[in-house]
Amino acid sequence: MPELPEVETVRQTLLPLLKNKVIVDVDIYWDNCVITKDFKHKITGQHIQDILRYGKYLVFVLDEDVMISHLRMEGKYYIHQPRKKAHHEHVVFHLNSDEYLTYHDTRKFGKFELISKSMYLEVPPLSLLGKEPKDSDSRSLYQKLTHKRIPIKMAFLDQHIIAGLGNIYVDETLYRAKIHPLKPCDKITQKEVVSLIKHATDVLEHATSLGGSTIRTYHAVHGVDGKFQNELKVHTKKDEPCERCQTPIIKIKVGGRGTYVCPTCQKQ
Ligand SMILES: [Zn+2]
């Protein structure tokens, strides 16, 4: 699943290719991925002025509206010459450059929404989004966590609490901060919150600089592969020795998600 570094890589790849192009038509082959009524009519004729990112959402800034795109599990974009529709292509944007911007999604979980430019930050989904680690302050995050009993990993996957982290980068953050993923939020100290914010920020920045991680089936736009999978310390490292203490990494389940832990460095 694309997380913040992968979505940022998509944004950086798409922006120079799409900036100032006009969407002249749209073909929607899977209605459920488009939330907005009259999407095709509303978006036709608008320029792509910019592409922003909030957490894991891509925000295409158009003339009147923004188009909010969430890739969810498997969403990918391709830019190519007009051709016959291929399998798993659910939305095709026709551009005035005679190119197509195609949205491809084998799982069909991705969503598109058009919201007026004047209010998109004040309404869901973006109004509900927590801050990214780099913008988080330890005191308010500590306040959010201290009343919760859920495991810290679950809290860090919740985009309302902190934005941009998914399964891979939460595991990496907790390992670096030496905190067990099952530790209840109300047992996390303020000092640990400071450490979590610092490590989450570092992990996301480092991963973004390497184009994200390419594991399993996820590739950024145009099949661009990230390199951060080579930097992973715990995620996917079951039975390999911990870099710090040589204890074999174990895999457990937290909220149904495969979770990698060093049982020595991350004491429960
Ligand atoms: Zn260890």
Image: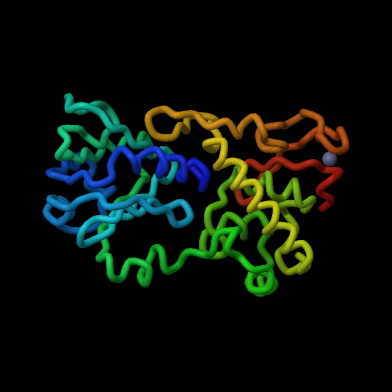
In-front residue for pair 3/47 = 47
Residue 163 shows in the view: yes
Q: Is residue 126 above or below residue 3?
A: below
In-front residue for pair 254/83 = 83
Report the residue at 21% width, 34% height from top: 100
Q: Is residue 209 above or below residue 57?
A: above
| 126 left or right, relative to 144 | left
Q: Is residue 64 above or below residue 44?
A: below
| 201 left or right, relative to 217 | right
Q: Is residue 242 above or below residue 180?
A: above
Report the residue at 58% width, 54% height from top: 157
> Whole-percent x and y of residue 188?
76, 65
> Whole-percent x and y of residue 67?
28, 54
Report ligand 1 position as a quadrant.
top right
Res. 65 image quadrant: bottom left
Report the residue at 25% width, 37% height from top: 101
> Whole-percent x and y of residue 230?
64, 29
| 19 left or right, relative to 98 | right
Report the residue at 35% width, 50% height from top: 51
